[in-house]
Image: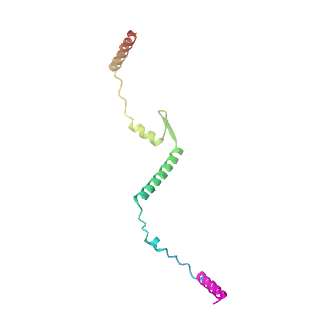
Amino acid sequence: MDFSDYLDNVLKQRQQQAKQPAQSKQQPLWVQQRQEDKTSQSLARDALAKAQEDASERAEQESKALHVRLNGRYLTAEEAQAKTKLQTQAAPANPDRIAYIQSLKKTLRSKKYKGN
């Protein structure tokens, strides 16, 4: 068998392979035996990446949302609503207590200046 015969055989094989439908290549044995079971570390990494994506999306949406100024802070409408719901009603001022505090301030002030 000379080189030209060998070359003809190779060319014929290539032509036959080109005519045949593409078959899925069989994977090597070590790839087939590999387990696709994820480790806890890779699961945690995936969960962390997903949480970061979600936080990024939420931050983007919140930055585009309409904000309301409440007590010197800018809040989204939902946050402002929640804050007003959680806010407790202040107790009415007790005049006796206010008078007592004023008298304490006066006595403290007088003690402060008498000491010098």
Indicate the position of residue 12 as horizontal and vertical percent values.
Answer: 62, 85
Q: Which residue is located at x 50 percent, y 46 percent?
A: 59
Q: Nearer the viewer, residue 96 or 15?
A: 15
Q: Residue 11: x and y, percent?
A: 64, 84
Identity of the residue drawn at 47% across and 54% down: 49
- In the picture provided, is 113 more to the left or to the right than 24? left
Q: Position of residue 55 (x, y in %)?
A: 48, 49
Q: Is residue 10 above or below residue 65?
A: below
Q: Is 13 placed above or below 66 here?
A: below
As drawn, 104 above or below 40: above
Query: Which coloring applies here?
Result: rainbow
Is residue 43 inside the magenta stretch?
no
Write down the quadrant of residue 42 in the picture: bottom left
Task: Count the numbered circles shown.
Answer: 0
The residue sitting at the front extreme is 2
Quadrant showing the N terminus: bottom right
- Observer-nearest of 13 and 1: 1
Q: Residue at x 32, y 19 (%)?
A: 96
- The residues colored magenta run 1-18
* The C terminus lies in quadrant: top left
Magenta part mainly helix, strand or loop?
Answer: helix
Identify which residue, 5 or 56, lies in the foreground: 5
Left or right: residue 43 versus residue 57 is left
